[in-house]
Amino acid sequence: MIKTLARSVREYKLPALLSPVCMVGEVAMEVLIPLVMAKLYDFGIEQQNMTVVVQQSVLLMLLAVISLGFGCASVWGKSLITDQQATELFEQAYSLGIRYFDTGYSYGLAEGRIGKILKESSLVRREELVISTKFGTKVEHGRYFHDFTPQWVFPSVESSLRTMGLEYVDLVMVHGPQIADLTPQYLKEIHRLKEEGLAKAVGVNTFDTDVLEYIRDTQCVDFVMPDYNIMRQDREVLLSQLHEKGIGVIAGAPLAESLYTNRVFKIRKPKDLWYLARALANHRGKIIQGQKYRFVNNVPGMTGAQVVLRYVLDNPNVTSAVFGCTTPSHLSDNAKAADITLPPDVTARIKNAEK
């Protein structure tokens, strides 16, 4: 049998020998990675020792690179989910009672998939949905960039409507402008979207506090989508002021980038390595801050995501919250946040986590 096998591999001898070696190497790296992660948490993040954080992070990334090298079957640039999976997730969300769906021109395949679902699904009813999209983004030569000129408002929104096969969207928002971009001419063109029947309400998607305060003071749009979550409780006074001025609030990033979990350190695919490197380079403070909220993962009968979402939804100044997901289980779990009640002691602990 061995002789027969040897004859069969012939010119493939080297790959045949390397395959089990690579498999063993990948398994070895996957065993070492959790050990390094444990040291990173225990002696680095929890004790706020940045020397250990940097050392173990570098080692973690090195092991991840080696592991990915051993198991190099992953494909870069592959879509997160297929069209069929996207349809199933959308219909599942609809069945769970979710009616608000947010998208944008710069969100890859999202607008086209929504259009396909609205056209082909026997379950989803357009008249029951609230759909929002964003404008101010252009693509040239495969590169995304902002265009906040008045003359680009209508072409951008009309392009999104064609892609989705819609005559109008319920909500449309400027994606990430600065105060200087919100000129009288630009705002006039934005509100003309409502006058022409292309949108029912116009708003701004921004995480910039200065822009949010400017909108509060000028009341120049109908609603905003800022970042608001358990780690952005500093937003709450401003959200209350916006609400008092009649400006609606949709919470963006309500799951706080899962920084209250260990998710950022889990390396399963090549892109995860990029996310980890970017997080460690740009968001070390947030990672440390997130550890103060780890207790939300231990609330009996609830997942951490449900606790975090429920806290956001309990804010009377928040109309809705948008989250993304790519698996049916995560969607189902997150949707349950609408039906749970946070124990008062959990809410109090969240509010006092950074005091």
Image (cartoon, grey):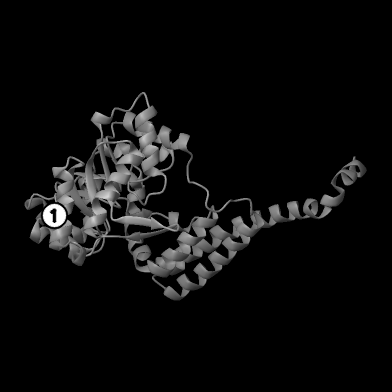
Q: Looking at this view, is 155 or 327 the one in front?
A: 155
In the rendered image, residue 350, in percent from the top left (x then y), is placed at 25, 54
Please name the residue shown 42% across and 64% down the image: 279
- Amino acid type, residue under disc 1 in the picture: Lys
In the rendered image, residue 315, in percent from the top left (x then y), is placed at 17, 48
Left or right placement of residue 164 versus residue 169 in this view = right
Residue 17 makes an appearance in the image: yes
Where the N terminus falls, by quadrant?
A: top right
Left or right placement of residue 186 versus residue 65 in this view = left
**Residue extending farthest top:** 122
**Which quadrant of the structure image shows residue 65?**
bottom right
In the rendered image, residue 243, in percent from the top left (x then y), is placed at 11, 51
**Residue extending farthest front:** 151
- Classify 10 Å Cα crowding around label 1: few (below 14), some (14-19), many (20 and above): few
Q: Looking at this view, is 174 or 147 the one in front?
A: 147
Left or right placement of residue 218 versus residue 339 in this view = left
Q: Read off the residue under disc 1.
A: 188
In the rendered image, residue 113, in percent from the top left (x then y), is placed at 40, 38
Please name the residue shown 23% across and 64% down the image: 178
Q: Looking at this view, is 326 or 260 the one in front?
A: 326
**Residue extending farthest right:** 3
Please name the residue shown 19% across and 51% down the image: 203
